[in-house]
Structure formats: structure tokens, C-alpha cells
Image: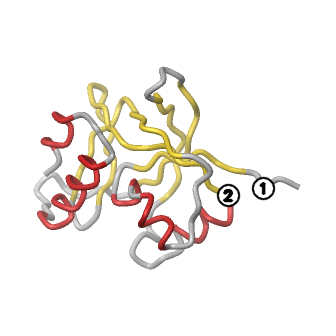
Amino acid sequence: MAVRRLDVFFYGLFMDKDLLQAKGVQPAFIHSASVEGFVLRIGERASLVPDESGRVHGVVASLSHDEVEKLYSEPSVRAYRPEAVLAHLANGKIIAALCFNLPQPPSPAERNPEYAAKLRVIAERIGLPVEYVASIQ
């Protein structure tokens, strides 16, 4: 019997396939994607904040229920909660996906230069738009 998989939109460090695999997660596929209506905000960790004119870039990965639970049961990300989003894939297709966000996003004044630097490296490596990579602070 095939394992049921969920499409998950990642916009933070979990965009890194190697990091997912190191955590025991084997995505069935990973596609570049974007989600409209949000902006990225980085404090201690990253989260998405609603913004009608915003667009966040990342990846959609297909994970099993067990993999999603395993990934988000770690203490550093346990506060994240799933939300439904429409992800625009690079091939033009739009799919429903889960997206994990903090119920209380970081304040606009919060900064985490170390996290932002790591995220820029991953975003550049996976080929996210240059202007988007440059905007990650």
C-alpha cells in the first residue's frame, strides 16, 4: 500500500534537501514554488506574515504524515502550526499545500543575521530569484 503524502511549502532552512534528509525525511519530490499574500519575517526563526502585496519564494516537498510529524516535533520548531496555502509551482501549476508558520510571528524589529545569512545561501543554491535572495534580511 502506498504511503499517503502531503505537499508542504517550505520557505526557511527546511528548503535544504540535505537538511531534510539529515533529519530522516525523504521527500518524494521538491519543486520551486511561491506563495502570494505573505512576506517573510525573520526573528529567532523565520515565519510568514500576511501581506496582500507580498510573495514568498521557496519549495514544495511531498512528505508522508509521519515525516511531517517527525520534522515539526523537534523543540526548535514545535511552535509552528500548519496553514493551507496555494503554491505556484515554477511550471505554472497551482497546488494546495501545507505551510507551517508561527502563531505569533517575530516583530518587525527582530533580526537574526546568522539565520538570514544561512537562508540566503540556501535560497541562492536552489535558484530562487536573485532579487528575492537579496531581500532576505
What's the residue at 37%, 29% (across, down)?
A: 36
In percent of width and height, residue 102 lies at 39, 58
Q: Earlier in the sequence, mark 2 or mark 1?
A: 1
Q: Is residue 119 above or below residue 9?
A: below
Pick whichever, 79 or 8, lies toward us.
Answer: 8
Q: Report how far apart the C-alphas of labels 2 and 1 lie in the structure.
A: 7 Å
Query: Looking at the rendering, in which quadrant would you find the N terminus?
Result: bottom right
In percent of width and height, residue 17 lies at 44, 58
Q: Residue furthest right?
A: 1
In contact (CB < 8 Å): disc 2 and disc 1: yes
Q: Quadrant of residue 7?
A: top right
Per the image, label 2 sits on a secondary structure element best described as: strand
Amino acid type at image mark 2? Ser
Q: Mark 2 highlights which residue?
A: 64
User: Mark on residue 3?
Assistant: 1
- Say whether residue 73 is left or right of residue 41: right
Per the image, label 1 sits on a secondary structure element best described as: loop
In percent of width and height, residue 80 lies at 45, 62
